[in-house]
Image: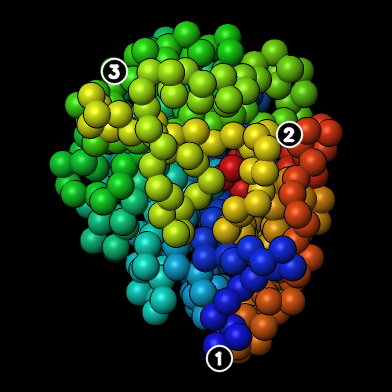
């Protein structure tokens, strides 16, 4: 079994982190993702609890140690707490994280914690209510920020706030974001806007290079932190005058893909070797019809098809029409 404990591709990258989408539905209308709102292409047919359990067991056998549950908006599934528990109770899985827009968090957080949730990421692309509403189509900033404070008070290990950098919306709010982490143990992660199949014009108008912000951070005395072994792609920075941290996710930066340690599975059971790959690989027919060993061996075979990197610099975003498809 030792061979199965190391899910490694042809470029010697080891994959210990799974981003599992459990729905592609979302109730927000973010202008960089779903400006026209969610539109189903057919009757939803998401992975069942039994299929999720089989999938997670196979990934765990291959050495996966961290699972992040994403959407769309994962809290739209009424069985989210059950899914968290399945992941957390799978031998080998050390960390279960959740990315959510936070609109149900105050009502459901206790059930998530009881199920075993370790880490929490919420999204607030602006700390100004009017701009938040303009970006998301929802007047829910207060609920999101209340959810962060609630998560901290209840002892969630790691709480992060995601913000997509948008030149005409939040680029002028950096000082407000910095002030937010002055006395809060929160990491704000600024995510460089990525071009997808349906946002070319928006991308051209709003894209900010993450390196612009990185330069500012270094000039202001922010210091790079060491990355955890199973961490995502963010570069995190700390400052002696701040309780919280600042993170940067810069997919257009040089060698961004060299340290890739994560794979993605869609809500319908398709393995995406890259967020911006052309192809996806259907695992669903095998989950309940094959042994855990067989599915694990299949994963080892499929990961050898992973390419060295994406082609975003060439304007090629693969089959990703919008980020809600796979939760980013």
Task: Work out whether 117 lies above or below 156.
Answer: below
Image location of residue 262, percent across then percent down: 58, 58
**Residue 149 occupies quadrant:** top left
Query: Who's the residue at 57% across and 58% down the image?
Result: 261
Q: Where is residue 260 drawn, in percent x and y?
A: 61, 54
Work out whether residue 77 or residue 253 is closer to the camera in this orientation and state it: 253
> Which residue is at 59% across, 66% downward?
14
Crowd tier of the residue under label 3, counting other residues whose Cα lies within 10 Å: few below 14, some 14–19, many 20 or above: few
Question: In the image shown, does 67 or 43 lie closer to the viewer?
Answer: 67
x%, y% of residue 104?
34, 40
- The quadrant the C terminus occupies is top right
Badge 2 crowding class, 10 Å Cα cut-off, few under 14, some 14 to 19, many 20 or more, is many
> Would residue 241 be found to the left or right of residue 230 on screen?
left
Q: Tell whether label 2 touches label 1 (CB within 8 Å).
A: no
- Dot 2 lies on which element? loop
Which mark is on residue 1?
A: 1
Tell me the tag on residue 179.
3
Residue in front for this viewpoint, 319 or 105: 319
Q: Residues within 10 Å of mark 1 (few under 14, many from 20)?
A: few
Quadrant in the picture for residue 285: bottom right
**Spatial distance from mark 2 to mark 3, Cα to Cα?**
32 Å
Q: In the image, what residue occupies the spot 23% across and 61% down?
A: 114
When the figure is inspected, residue 213 is found, relative to residue 188, above or below; the finding is above
Q: Secondary structure at mark 3?
A: helix
Which-is-in-front pick, marks 2 and 3? 3
Q: Which residue is mark 2?
A: 196
Distance between the alpha carbons at the discs numbered 3 and 1: 50 Å
Helix, strand or loop at disc 1?
loop
């Amino acid at each position: 079994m030792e061979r199965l404990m190391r899910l490694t591709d042809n470029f010697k990258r080891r994959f210990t982190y799974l981003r599992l989408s459990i729905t592609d539905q979302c109730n927000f209308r973010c202008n960089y993702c779903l400006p026209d709102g969610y539109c189903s292409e057919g009757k939803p047919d998401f992975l069942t609890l039994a299929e999720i359990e089989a999938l997670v067991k196979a990934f765990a056998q291959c050495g996966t140690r961290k699972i992040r549950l994403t959407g769309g908006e994962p809290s739209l599934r009424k069985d989210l707490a059950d899914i968290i528990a399945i992941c957390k109770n799978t031998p080998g899985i050390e960390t279960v994280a959740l990315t959510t827009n936070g609109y149900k968090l105050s009502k459901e957080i206790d059930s998530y914690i009881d199920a075993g949730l370790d880490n929490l990421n919420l999204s607030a692309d602006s700390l100004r209510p009017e701009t938040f509403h303009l970006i998301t189509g929802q007047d829910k900033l207060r609920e999101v920020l209340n959810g962060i404070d609630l998560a901290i008070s209840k002892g969630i290990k790691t709480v992060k706030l995601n913000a997509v950098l948008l030149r005409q919306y939040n680029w002028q709010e950096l000082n407000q974001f910095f002030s937010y982490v002055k006395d809060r143990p929160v990491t704000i992660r600024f995510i460089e806007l990525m071009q997808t199949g349906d946002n070319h014009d928006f991308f051209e108008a709003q894209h900010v290079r993450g390196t612009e912000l990185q330069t500012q951070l270094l000039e202001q005395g922010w210091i790079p932190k060491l990355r955890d072994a199973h961490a995502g792609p963010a570069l995190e920075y700390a400052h002696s005058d701040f309780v919280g941290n600042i993170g940067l996710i810069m997919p257009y930066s040089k060698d961004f893909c060299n340290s890739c340690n994560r794979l993605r599975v869609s809500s319908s059971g398709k393995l995406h070797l890259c967020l911006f790959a052309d192809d996806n690989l259907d695992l669903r027919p095998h989950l309940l019809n094959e042994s855990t060993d067989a599915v694990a061996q299949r994963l080892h075979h499929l990961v050898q098809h992973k390419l060295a990197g994406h082609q975003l610099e060439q304007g090629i975003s693969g089959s990703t029409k919008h980020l809600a498809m796979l939760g980013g």
